[in-house]
Image: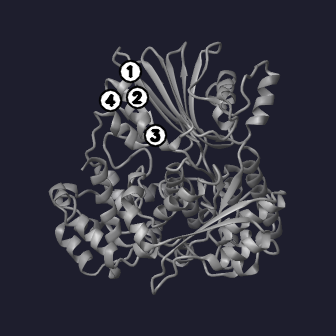
Amino acid sequence: MCGIAGELRLDGHTPDLGVMRRMLDRLRRRGPDHEGSYSDGPLMLGHRRLSIIDLSTHANQPMVDAELGLALVFNGSIYNYPQLREELKGLGYHFYSTGDTEVIIKAYHAWGEACVPRFLGMFCLVLWDMNRRHLFMARDRLGIKPLYYSKEARWLRFASTPQALIAAGDVDTALDPIALHHHLTLHAVVPAPRTLLKGIRKLAPAHTMAVSATGECRIRPYWSLAATRPPRPLSEGQWVEQVREALTRAVERRLRIADVPVGVLLSGGLDSSLLVGLLAQCGVSDLKTFTVGFDDQPEEKGNEFEYSDLVVKRFATDHYKFYISNQEVLERLPEAVDNMAEPMVGQDAVAFYLLAEQVSKEVKVVQSGQGADEVFGGYFWYPLMQADRSENDLQRFRRYYFDRSHAEYAQTVTPTYLAEDYTSQLISELLNKSHADSFLDAVLRMDVTTLIVDDPVKRVDNMTMAWGLEARVPFLDHQLVELALRMPPELKLKGQGKHPLKSIARGLIPDAVIDRPKGYFPVPALKYVRGPFFQLMEQILNSTTCRQRGLFNRGYVDRLLADPEANLTPLHGSKLWHLALLEMWLQRNFL
């Protein structure tokens, strides 16, 4: 895990050292263990390292192989690198380090761009070919690791966060109207290649990008996901057994490929509890687990300690339990927002930030349960969509998912930002893509490949990496995802969702955890907006800066301020928090 940055000049000039300095300074928290840079004519690469695999200086980056004429910066972990290393040795390659970074260089030299589909893991990588004067970038299949870029006539810059690109200077920070529409209607999801800012884009998951020294750019997909049944039908028992094998393999991969201890973020829900159980089955006897809780609200508890305690007792883990008061959440909200690559309205973003701070004092790597609900149909809205008999698939989806209709969007923003119904257009295209056997197959595929990438997955990366903590997500192992998306959706939804995971968990973790009502990572004060939290949001939205920006329709803002608890989204989020968070993010990044 690391932070990467770079600049390729397209105008014959050499990169500005000051630009790289500013970008690396903004990436310091992602990589506290080492900083390095490399330059070659029009190119400069920069890297901030979090040492996880091969802790020696031999694995520092940028990694340069002068003999092969390649230089690399890389963020992530390649879980099958030992097997690739042995294969490359058989081809005559020699290694001077023991980690995964050098394997990427050799693999690219041996197989060219075709090396990327061979990698199992989470990654974004940028390779410079010294001889061809050619830059090659790639992002993992499910977008677990981020890669942002900014391109104009004089240069191409890239970095792990938009803030690093903004710090570099000369970025168009005007709001992208299409991205803004997505953000305010699609639960703050802005799918690649867009971001809220016109001058910054992001490489889509499962894509590569090649850039020549003259600025010619080619972007290609290297993987796609089918949601179709296999040629030979499987019984329920066969499906469950195959999922058990694939998930166990995914957990083991993320345990073994690390030269530091690995812990678990234990929420008390099924997914993280199952990870603890499977790690115990793998022979881990000294596992560290971490749980966080917050103040209750009358409508909702702020912790799930009663369930996490059962798991801790069952497996005798080395457990750390943290309680964070509403006062501390309030005081540190601005700090958490500063570490959001893009505005994130999910209340668990703040929870992850404050939890990661404590966890990073004990371990450098954790496994987390993100992705299980999307891959195995665990959310309450999936059965509602399945039961809906609307003829229009778009209508079946947006009724239960969109934060605002297009009509309400038109009430939310001022005339300057009025736009077409871009979100409905996008969702229609995604739902109508080929290789999905049913409406719910298409929904689950869209969720896994697009929606969670820029919602929970991005939150986990941002909030953990802000403390130099690597979060690994076994439920998003692409081989497990491929298997799960072939499974009939009715099997996933059976028994109120995630039936295959519940079957695997039965007898391994306490029944009370399996049979409990579905829970979420709660920070109730950001859902039921009252007291000091309301005062903060009111102050932000009534600020001179907000009014002068002219983004929000004042009548709409006033209606939300008059009764925030009556204005929740279909996903039970606060519409007031949504607007306040966006304005707060804008103010803290560029006023």
Q: CA distance from mark 1 to mark 3?
A: 18 Å
Residue 20 disc label: 2
Q: Amino acid at mark 3?
A: Leu
- Residue at the disc numbered 3: 27
Q: Find residue 317 and report its image quarter.
A: bottom right
Q: Is residue 178 left or right of residue 187?
A: left
Q: Amino acid at mark 2?
A: Met
Lower position in the chain sequence, tag 4 or tag 1: 1
Residue at 45%, 76% in the rendered image: 524
Q: Secondary structure at mark 4?
A: loop
Q: Secondary structure at mark 3?
A: loop
Q: Find residue 93 and report its image quarter.
A: top right
Lower position in the chain sequence, tag 2 or tag 3: 2
Q: Is residue 1 left or right of residue 530?
A: right
Along the line of sight, which residue is nearer the eye, 55 or 392?
A: 55
Location of residue 309 in the rendering, given as x and y in whole percent from the top left corner: 69, 75
Pointer 4 and pointer 1: residues touching (CB < 8 Å)?
no
Q: Is residue 116 above or below residue 430?
A: above
Lower position in the chain sequence, tag 4 or tag 2: 2
Q: Amino acid at mark 1?
A: Pro
Q: CA distance from mark 4 to mark 3?
A: 22 Å
Q: CA distance from mark 4 to mark 2?
A: 17 Å
Q: Secondary structure at mark 1?
A: loop
Q: Amino acid at mark 4?
A: Glu
Residue at 45%, 82% in the rendered image: 297
Q: Disc 1 vs disc 3: which is toward the camera?
A: 3
The extreme bottom residue here reads 298
